[in-house]
Image (cartoon, grey):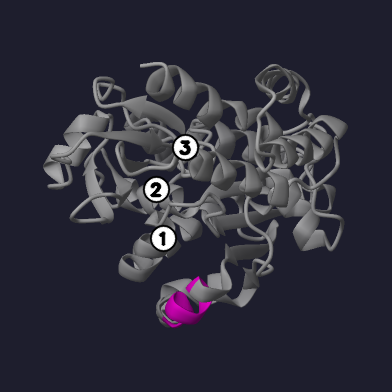
Amino acid sequence: MLKIDILKKIADAGLVGRGGASFPTAQKWAAVSDALKTKKLGYIIVNGAEGEPGVKKDGYIIANYPEEVLAGVYLADQFLGSVKIKRIYFFLKPEYYQKYAAGLKKVLTAKKYRALGAKLEFFLKPPDLTYIGGEETALLNLIEGKKIQPRLKPPYPTMSGLHNHPTLINNTETFYNVGRVAGGKYEEDRFYTVSGAVKRPGVYKLPINLTIEEVLRQTGNYPRSPFFVQTGGEASGEVFNSLQLEQPVSGVGSIMVYDLEKTNRRKLLKYWLKFYHDQSCGQCVPCREGTYRLWEMINKPELDHKLFWEIVFALEETSFCGLGSSLPLPLKSYFNNIVKK
């Protein structure tokens, strides 16, 4: 398949990244390809480690569609110029590697993928690393053996990524979609993770751009008792009440359902704030100090609401990366849509 053909197919299909940012896939591939015109070598990273709590789609895809995922990686390698791609890293959680690596390795024994397999290396996420390792520049530092924290951008990984060489970083679902597009099997669908207070939790493949309500109803998970939801992950996702379900399910495609009457407000806030406190890399003061102060405040008998929201605002406006700046979203949407409803 000619380079222009696969890029056009990806663009025509409207593929975007499925790691959360939804960046146009064709645009990213083209940027790396352009950078390699003046560079001797580059890298590909498959991000299948899922740092956001409540998201299970990558494991499901790797378990059920290993050949489609590797077909997408193969096409990326060919598109960028196989002789220039020095190494391909498949970033996985240890439990995913234990469960699904055998299936991936079996696919790589096929004649078509042997050259790919020779330069593909599985890179396991450290057990205590959750969110920040999924940020693409922090992931670069992790692989290079440096301190795991985000880099200043620009330059972007497409221009200066791993070891300062052009690097393509895509989510597992993105490579799966590329493989489907190239084979003429893409049906404008995506994977949704449904969890929480539902009867049928799991990962579902459904049409893209469905609303929250449509996903819950089509999967048989629409609750009968009062509820609210959080979409985009159990930590950084936005919270909506049951009258706001016409919102599309964007980002990583997850829906967490909470029982309105049984959910303890303080426990929920503690869960969110503990996650951010534990996962802050400590690089920037707003996030390092802000997440610590918020966690400290929520554990006191009385909450200083004025100071609490001042810190939240500071995190939103001044954090260096997406970890600190995403913390206000669940808090603000929860208080606006649930507590004050």
Q: Nearer the viewer, residue 28 or 91?
A: 91
Q: Is residue 108 visible?
A: no
Image location of residue 332, percent across then percent down: 53, 22
Nearest to the observer: residue 205 or residue 249: 249
As drawn, the label of residue 147 is none
Residue lying at the far front in this picture: please name it.
301
Instruction: Read off the magenta span.
Output: 96-102
Callout 1: 10 Å neighbours few (<14), some, many (20+)?
A: many
Dot 1 lies on which element?
Answer: helix
Mark 3 against mark 1, which lies toward the viewer? 3
Question: Mark 3–mark 1 contact, CB under 8 Å?
Answer: no
Rendered image quadrant of residue 93: bottom right
Q: Which mark is residue 178?
A: 2
User: Judging from the image, what secondary structure is the residue with disc 2 in?
Assistant: helix
Q: Of marks 2 and 1, which one's residue comes earlier in the chain?
A: 1
Q: Find residue 69 and name its label.
A: 1
Residue hosting label 3 = 265
Q: Amino acid at mark 3?
A: Arg
Cα distance, mark 3 to mark 1?
Answer: 40 Å
